[in-house]
Image (cartoon, rainbow, N blue to C red):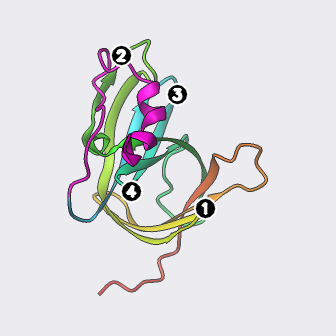
Amino acid sequence: MSIQTNQLFEYTSKRNFEKTPEPKSGEKKTGPLLFVIHEHHASRLHWDLRLEKDGVLKSWAVPKGVPETPKIRHLAIETEDHPYDYGNFEGTIPQGQYGAGLVKIWDRGHYTPKVWANDKIEVKLEGKRLHGIYVLVRLKKSENQKNWLLLKSRDTEKLV
């Protein structure tokens, strides 16, 4: 079993690929690191932030959306890794299937990692909608170790 297969075990175990149009797998293409934000109309509307790392898309559900200005912090709940091909996925997950509802790409682009540690991830996003430095910080006092805060940093880098 490959590392990627191990990373996608939770993802594949939650889905019936005979019923859902979601991609089962996908290999990373060469080039810059991908990020995608899905608008997901499931039982509750939320956004899914996905960052490419180690051949998969690391994922967080963001109930209130990705902050577009500094000083706003939103809860981001870490979810299972998704296959690289999910970065192109748009469609409707059928009723009765995990995550049922409409999924569409809200933003997509590339990112540069600044910090990727166990409790903090800092990336520079360059998408169609979002630009700048975003930070995920794990909530240490939370009982659920999957809870993070997502915020847009004040961009200190000068544009050339």
Residue 111 location (% of width, % of height): 35, 65
- Kindly report which numbered mark, 4 or 3, lies closer to the viewer in this rendering: 4
User: Can you say whether 47 is above or below 133 in the image?
Assistant: above
What amino acid is labelled 2 in the image?
Pro
Task: Spot the residue most to the front.
Answer: 1
Is tag 1's residue or tag 4's residue first in the polypeptide sequence?
Answer: 4
Q: Which residue is mark 3?
A: 44
Q: CA distance from mark 2 to mark 1?
A: 35 Å
Q: CA distance from mark 4 to mark 3?
A: 30 Å
Is tag 1's residue or tag 3's residue first in the polypeptide sequence?
Answer: 3
Mark 3 crowd level (few <14, some 14–19, many ≥20, 10 Å Cα):
few
Q: Which residue is mark 2?
A: 94
Q: For the C terminus, which image quadrant?
A: bottom left
Element type at marker 4?
loop
Q: For the N terminus, which image quadrant?
A: top left
- Kindly report which numbered mark, 1 or 3, lies closer to the viewer in this rendering: 1
Task: Spot the residue most to the left.
Answer: 30
Is tag 2's residue or tag 3's residue first in the polypeptide sequence?
Answer: 3
Q: CA distance from mark 1 to mark 4?
A: 15 Å
Viewer-nearest residue: 113 or 18: 18
Q: Is residue 48 left or right of residue 93?
A: right
What amino acid is labelled 3 in the image?
Arg
Q: Which residue is mark 4?
A: 54
Residue 14 shows up from this direction: yes
Q: CA distance from mark 1 to mark 3?
A: 28 Å
Task: Identify the residue shown where x is 49% and y is 37%.
Answer: 46
Q: Which residue is mark 1?
A: 118
Is tag 2's residue or tag 1's residue first in the polypeptide sequence?
Answer: 2
What amino acid is labelled 1 in the image?
Asn
Residue numbers of the magenta segment: 1-29
Instruction: Assess whether residue 85 is covered by the magenta stretch.
Output: no
Residue 133 shows up from this direction: no
